[in-house]
Image (cartoon, grey):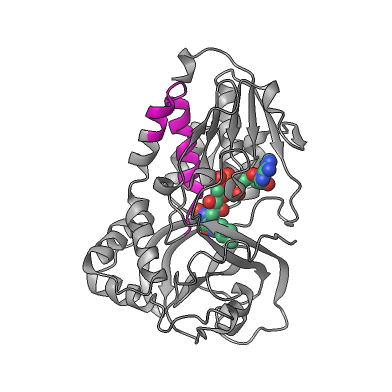
Amino acid sequence: MIDGGKPSRLAIAGAGVAGAYAYRLLRDRGYPADLYDVKKKTRCGISPCAWGTSGEFIDLVKVAGLDPSQYILERVDQVVIDGIRFKIEMITIDKPRFVRDLLQGAGVSYGPVDLEAYSRVIDATGVSRALLSPIRGDVFMPCFQSRIETRRELEARIILGEIGYAWCFPLGENHYHIGCGSLVKDPHDVLRSLDLMGGQSSKGDTTICSCRGRIRLTGPHLSLPFVSDRSADGIWGVGEAIGCVGPMAGDGIVPSMKTVRILLKEWDDPEAYTRSILEEFHWMEGERTLVDKLRNMEQPTIANARVLLENSKRMGMRIGLKEVTSLMNNLRVKSPPSSTSWRDSLPLRRGQTVWIASCKGSLSTSFLLETG
Ligand SMILES: Cc1cc2nc3c(=O)[nH]c(=O)nc-3n(C[C@H](O)[C@H](O)[C@H](O)COP(=O)(O)OP(=O)(O)OC[C@H]3O[C@@H](n4cnc5c(N)ncnc54)[C@H](O)[C@@H]3O)c2cc1C
């Protein structure tokens, strides 16, 4: 436990949700850390994210001494996936405000961390994984998202298809995140071809901002090492930097916060830290297996369906095996993408089911920019 450990000079690289949460919990235990980040181009000031999460968020916020109700924008109890209505227990949160409150005005330096100046450095740099060694065969899903204000009342919706999925998440007060992730097409193009808002855009619709980002689908079991010895007391990864994001749904908020709690518990034991992370996020392994199946255009099995069935319970979803199987089958790539032009392959038709797909390995550099 950190409370029994020796004091050390600490730096946290990355002031996203994992870095800010680590900063806060460490500070509360009497371990102040210096924060480093890079300038972001998003209007909201944080990494691109749809701000949807599960009820587990609430207890994790309380651990930081903050009031969860301050951050809940909407409680979503139903979601329409490819025209089928499902019960769900999801919340959307004001993630920028949450990160801001965790930091409570702490100064952030912009520039590289001088590893020599610190005994321990926490790599909380998300998809960048700026300090730990690069991951071989890292898999990223490029995404595009807009924040829309509209007078129309929209439902929480997900449209799946062969190559990714699109979402509409309510943020309260007529605001919505409308986005798409895709491995084989420009997600912005896919989004334009879909009818997520249930009809033609109307005069009252305003696009507040748009951004591009990417989600690491690699999974923690393929994102080792979590700790390296590049500084005296090591560089310790947390959050998306060590692959703790659900490879199918791309949910990384709660997993990132959980990695910080595990870090504090196993503060002086890199092996125990690695073991605990792999145990806690074991469920991501089955999702990654399914991602690979879909990427390789293989037929998913009942065992894959059971993984989704089990994992969907995290969001309070109650889906039958038959429904899961049919949704999962719709995720499959129906025809191989052209090796010369992946952008033009696999037309995404409205209402088709999309998730993750093919184009082995070649896309990680396709959409690295975040734009405001
Ligand atoms: C479009 C999109 C939608 C998503 N929607 C959801 C969702 O609805 N729900 C959900 O749970 N998850 C979602 N995710 C995933 C989720 O956003 C991340 O998994 C989560 O934020 C990871 O937290 P993190 O702190 O590890 O990384 P981040 O939140 O990405 O923070 C990393 C920080 O490191 C900084 N940084 C980067 N490079 C450096 C460097 N060299 N030096 C210093 N700092 C650096 C960044 O500027 C950033 O502040 C989404 C992701 C995307 C791209």
Image coordinates for residue 133, horizontal then vertical, percent: 56, 41
Image coordinates for residue 26, horizontal then vertical, percent: 56, 25
**Residue name at image x 71 percent, y 54 percent:** 44
Main secondary structure along the magenta-highlighted residues: helix
Image coordinates for residue 68, horizontal then vertical, percent: 52, 42
Is 118 on the left-hand or right-hand side of 362?
A: right
> Between 23 and 295, which is closer to the camera in this rendering?
295
Position of residue 78 relative to residue 230, above or below, is below
Which quadrant of the view contains residue 327? bottom left
Position of residue 110 relative to residue 289, above or below, is above
Residue 70 in view of the camera: no
Magenta highlight on residue 117? no
Magenta highlight on residue 267? yes
Instruction: Give the residues in magenta.
Output: 250-274
Is 309 on the left-hand or right-hand side of 85?
A: left
Query: Could you tell me which quadrant the C terminus lies in?
Result: bottom right
> Between 133 and 31, which is closer to the camera in this rendering?
133
The mark total stands at: 0
Position of residue 104 relative to residue 177, above or below, is above
**Residue name at image x 28 percent, y 64 percent:** 304
Is 364 on the left-hand or right-hand side of 4?
A: right
Query: Could you tell me which quadrant the N terminus lies in?
Result: top left
Image coordinates for residue 66, horizontal then vertical, percent: 56, 35
Residue 267 in view of the camera: yes
Which quadrant of the view contains residue 207? bottom right
Which quadrant of the view contains residue 309? bottom left
